[in-house]
Amino acid sequence: MTSGQKIRQAHSVHPSGWPLGTSLSLNDWANGHVDIEAVRQAGITCIELAWRNDAFDLFNPANEIICNSWIENMRELGMNIWTLHLPYGPAFDISTVDEAASAEASRLLCRLMRLAHEWGIPMVVLHPSWEPISEEERPGRLEACRGALSVLADEAEALGIRIAVECLPRTCLGNTGREIGNLLAADPRLGICCDVNHLLKEAPEAFIREQGQRIFTVHMSDCDGKDERHWMPGMGSIRWNEVLRALVLHDYQGPFMFEVRRPDPSELAACWEQLIKGYDLAYPEVAEYP
């Protein structure tokens, strides 16, 4: 058996086997900026639904009805709604040390998790905090967040869905692999949404090597290493071959979920093709995986 065959046997995943996905903004959809047929024709089969609640209030029954019709349309096209990205901001900040505010944030998030369950969406993505957070208040905010995550994990299990806690940039909670691990210690049922564009304090591939076994899903876009940018992969400083390889070595089985602003479906498909070509050139011993 050759060394390449041994690698393929030990790690049968190849990035080309991952479904292709993209995050879609409900705000954009409501304003006529989403062509779901073009998304499907580009070979994108997995969708994350995201929104800013101040621009598209999903607690408004009329908006819920509209969103339900979009979901039905996607399913008629054979698409998989992979995740519901829960909104974030002060009203949804489960890391606040104000117990009443934390309880209200959890209540709102639970309402949306119940919607995910009703719509048959198996996973929600959750931001563990808002910002800014000072170093002095960080320990208390981490403790408050862990307490809320444990409660939300109970609700998620009752609904039959999973929670992916997203790594975040700057002063937000979960800005390193170590701190995400600290948060996930709240409950073994929790997993990670690995947003590589948010990892400003360490290389994304290092984060994946440390926390890869708990990664449920990903957000893929590029940055300049100074702040999140949500650029198309290849336009910034992220080492994509290393990121893909780290995910492969941890047997990641979810979609390659783009999270770029105002995505053009054909550009996403072309970018993915280039990423696969680059990976196969960097790791020719595993490039033959069907």
Image (tube, rainbow, N blue to C red):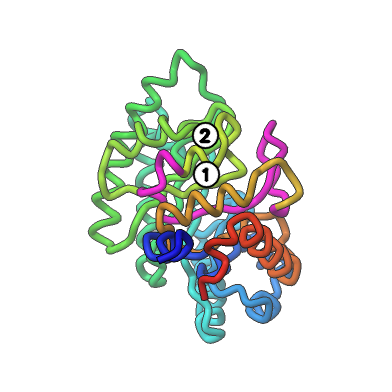
Residue at figure coordinates x 41%, y 30% from the top left: 179
Of 268 and 278, which appears nearest the observer?
Answer: 278
Give the labeled residue for mark 2: 130
Pointer 2 and pointer 1: residues touching (CB < 8 Å)?
yes
Of 32 and 61, which appears nearest the observer?
Answer: 32
State whether residue 165 appears in this view.
yes
* Magenta highlight on residue 231: yes
x then y, percent, for residue 53: 56, 51
Vertical comparison of 282 with 68: above or below? above
Q: Amino acid at mark 1?
A: Tyr
Vertical comparison of 259 with 267: above or below? above
* Magenta highlight on residue 75: no
| Disc 1 packing (10 Å; few <14; some 14–19; many ≥20) | some
x then y, percent, for residue 115: 40, 64
What is the span of residues highlighted in magenta in the rendered image?
209-233
Between discs 2 and 1, the one toward the N terminus: 1
Figure quadrant of residue 39: bottom right
Residue 88: which disc? 1
Vertical comparison of 146 with 16: above or below? above
